Amino acid sequence: MSKKKTNPSQEVYRKKLLRRRKPNRSIAGDIVLYLFLVLVALIMAFPIVYAVGSALKPLDELFKFPPTILPKHPTLDNFSDLFVTMGKSWVTFTRYLFNTVFITFMGTFGHLLVASMAAFVLAKYEFPGGNTFFKLVTVAMMFTGYVTQIPNYLILNKLGWIDTYWAIIVPAFASPMGLFLMKQFMEGLPSALIEAAKIDGASEWTVFTNIVMPNVKPAWMTLIIFSVQALWNNRASIYIYSEERKTLVYALQQIQSGGIARTGQGAAVLVVVMIVPIAIFIFSESQILETMASSGLKD
């Protein structure tokens, strides 16, 4: 029996991979590296720890100088007072929560769908004006939301979408960051894989949903994180005027600006606002790292 020949390029790649898995570092180098990572982790975790600690402090500790990081007598009074204040509003807390969840879900889903489909066409098909269109998308990333607020308002007013959910949801579909991110990932996907699927009789939609999207999972997971963070923290006060359509962040920030008497509630507001984006990031991060480590494809 003849032995199976090994591709020289595969052998070189395997040796490089083994060398990468066994870094040439001393024990002292490893200790310094881990100490540096621990220091960076503490610096990044400090704002979150301080915010949670402040939300659990009674009022006398909140005004203490110099301030302490952790509460000496932790209490949940700030959260209970917050929900009591929200309960006195003529618009219920659940209504604010529904508005935010609906806007966040619909905006994120639409952004992911539009950005991924447009990126697939731009990355894997050549057509007149394709490069020009992508250059426009790249240029659009230079403009912040403050620059585009006036033209956005005029367009949405012409469409009759002011004071509706769609004034926030539809503009989220066209965020240039998502399209740029998805296109860059899809360009690294082997074209031979797509061509083989088409030869086997797969339709464009089948190729897109069953081949392209699973192999660019890191991109769309990252897109979801960014989109949820942007929409969840959107006050929507410029385009939505009716109180029953206001978002949860707007209502909480109104409470937060209530003066010294609501300092404790303001600290609790900060925790409530940031807990959802942080939770989504924590649950998504492991999937992103796992996918990046196991699903890389190259021609």
Image (spheres, rainbow, N blue to C red):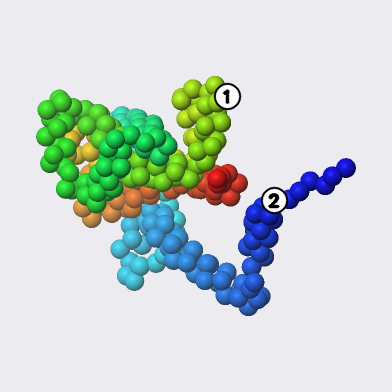
Distance CA(mark 2)–CA(mark 1)? 27 Å
Where is residue 193? Give x, y as percent: 55, 35
- Report whether 36 appears left or right of 119: right
Structural crowding at the residue carrying mark 1, measured as other residues with C-alpha within 10 Å and reported as few (<14), some (14–19) or many (≥20): few
Task: Describe the element under mark 1 as helix, strand or loop.
Answer: loop
Residue 175 can be seen in this image = no
Closer to us: 281 or 172: 172
Q: How many marks?
A: 2
Looking at the figure, which quarter contains the C terminus? top right
- Report whether 117 appears left or right of 133: right
Residue under label 2? 7
Closer to us: 56 or 179: 179
- Report whether 134 appears left or right of 198: left
Looking at the figure, which quarter contains the N terminus? top right
* Residue at 40% in and 39% down: 123
Residue under label 1? 200
Q: Identify which amino acid the numbered label 2 is placed on.
A: Asn
Outermost residue toward the bottom in this view: 28
Closer to us: 76 or 257: 257
Give residue 142's mark.
Answer: none
Outermost residue toward the front in this view: 2
